[in-house]
Amino acid sequence: PVIEALRHGRQVQKIYIQHGNQSGSIRQIYRMARDLKIPVSNADARKLR
């Protein structure tokens, strides 16, 4: 859902990613967020539930 939102120009103010997650899709989100100047923060899994 995050990648699709970024691709379709949805307004995103900040992205939270589970700490330690470095899968391929997460790396893609980091790249897209960097290109779009959207801040990305790492968070514990408990806080993301």
Image: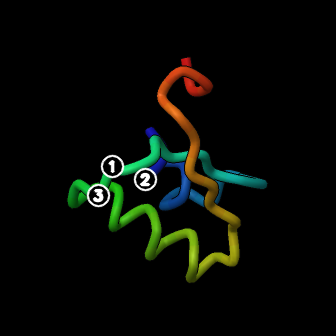
Q: How many marks?
A: 3
- Answer with mark 3 or mark 2, whichever residue precedes in sequence: 2
Q: Dot 1 corresponds to which residue?
A: 21
User: Is label 1 in a helix, a strand or a loop?
Assistant: loop
The front one of 24 and 6 is 24
When the figure is inspected, residue 48 is found, relative to residue 7, above or below; the finding is above
The residue at the point 43 percent across, 53 percent down is 3
Amino acid at the residue labelled 2: Ile
The residue at the point 44 percent across, 38 percent down is 1
- Is residue 40 left or right of 20 when viewed as pictured? right
Which numbered tag is attached to residue 3? 2
Which corner quadrant of the image does residue 23 belong to? bottom left
Amino acid at the residue labelled 1: Asn
Task: Give the spatial CA distance, label 3 vs label 2.
Answer: 15 Å
Task: Give the spatial CA distance, label 3 vs label 1.
Answer: 4 Å
The residue at the point 69 percent across, 65 percent down is 39
Q: Dot 3 corresponds to which residue?
A: 22
Task: Give the spatial CA distance, label 2 vs label 1.
Answer: 15 Å
Badge 3: how crowded within 10 Å, few (<14), some, or many (20+)? Answer: few
Are discs 2 and 1 less than 8 Å apart at CB?
Answer: no
User: Is label 3 in a helix, a strand or a loop?
Assistant: loop
Which corner quadrant of the image does residue 35 belong to? bottom right
Which numbered tag is attached to residue 6? none
The percent position of residue 8, horizontal first and vertical second, equals 54, 56
Locate the C terminus by quadrant: top right
The front one of 1 and 15 is 15
Badge 1: how crowded within 10 Å, few (<14), some, or many (20+)? Answer: few
Amino acid at the residue labelled 3: Gln
User: Is label 2 in a helix, a strand or a loop?
Assistant: helix
